[in-house]
Image (cartoon, rainbow, N blue to C red):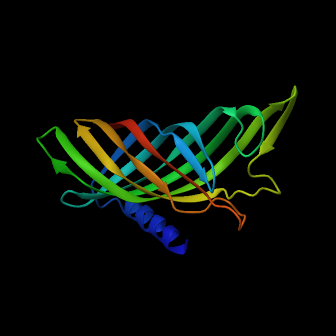
């Protein structure tokens, strides 16, 4: 945990120093999430909106850091409960991604990327209806069995054309989100998105 915060502080210091060339990007993305428990799994639809700043460390090699707001939803069978209903989760993610730009021509390049992504769940709940009675389960309440914090390993590639970015990849949850010693719960999923540099 201390190493992750040290990396964030180092990247922030680089941005403040402003000595390296930097490129800003805003983006939107489709990012479904799968919760995998010991004996079951749940698939959620996910969407994100974010901002990142890529600092060139040396020719071709850069590090991109930023923040994104991500929302996961699922309707139908309840998550972490019984009955049917709607589940919603809102997260704040902080990706820190090493990338290497491979130029095809002046306007087109491909940049593979890899790195960690810190994630904090701000809201998580399931609204269920059983026999005509509605109930809301707070995933992160006082007696919750779920952790809000997660750490992902992220990898993928970004196709850059002029000021536009088309990117995709996969995020693999590294932390067991279940507080219980008798089960494990991890989150992972692919993502695709479209960004604009300015």
Q: Which residue appears at 41% of the width and 60% of the height?
A: 16
Tell me which corner region of the image, top left, top right, bottom left or bottom right, holds residue 193.
Answer: top left
Name the foreground residue: 54 vs 101: 101
Q: Is residue 28 above or below residue 190?
A: above
User: Which quadrant is home to the C terminus?
Assistant: top left
Residue 194 in view in this figure = yes
Q: Is residue 181 left or right of residue 41?
A: right
Q: Which residue appears at 56% of the width and 54% of the height?
A: 119
Name the foreground residue: 1 vs 57: 1
**Total number of numbered labels?**
0
Q: Is residue 6 above or below residue 124?
A: below
Q: Position of residue 81 (x, y in %)?
A: 76, 43
Q: Which residue appears at 33% of the width and 41% of the height?
A: 167
Tell me which corner region of the image, top left, top right, bottom left or bottom right, holds residue 77.
Answer: top right
Name the foreground residue: 14 vs 176: 176
User: Which quadrant is home to the N terminus?
Assistant: bottom right
Tell me which corner region of the image, top left, top right, bottom left or bottom right, holds residue 182.
Answer: bottom right
Q: Residue furthest left?
A: 105
Q: Is residue 161 left or right of residue 119?
A: left
Q: Is residue 165 left or right of residue 84?
A: left
């Amino acid at each position: 945990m201390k190493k992750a915060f040290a990396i964030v502080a180092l990247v922030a210091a680089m941005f403040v120093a402003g000595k390296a060339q930097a490129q800003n990007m805003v983006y939107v993305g489709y990012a479904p999430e799968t919760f995998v428990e010991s004996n079951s799994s749940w698939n959620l639809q996910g969407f994100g909106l974010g901002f990142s700043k890529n600092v060139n460390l040396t020719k071709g090699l850069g590090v991109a850091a930023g923040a994104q707001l991500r929302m996961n939803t699922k309707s139908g069978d309840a998550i972490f409960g019984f009955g049917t209903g709607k589940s919603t989760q809102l997260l704040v993610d902080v990706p820190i991604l090493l990338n290497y730009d491979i130029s095809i021509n002046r306007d087109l390049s491909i940049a593979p990327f890899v790195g960690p992504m810190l994630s904090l769940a701000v809201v998580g709940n399931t609204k269920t209806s059983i026999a005509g009675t509605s109930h809301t389960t707070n995933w992160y309440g006082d007696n919750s069995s779920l952790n809000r914090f997660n750490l992902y390993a992220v990898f993928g590639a970004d196709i850059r054309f002029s000021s536009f970015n088309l990117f995709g990849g996969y995020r693999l949850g590294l932390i067991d989100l279940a507080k219980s010693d008798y089960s494990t719960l991890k989150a992972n999923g692919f993502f695709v998105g479209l960004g604009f540099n300015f």
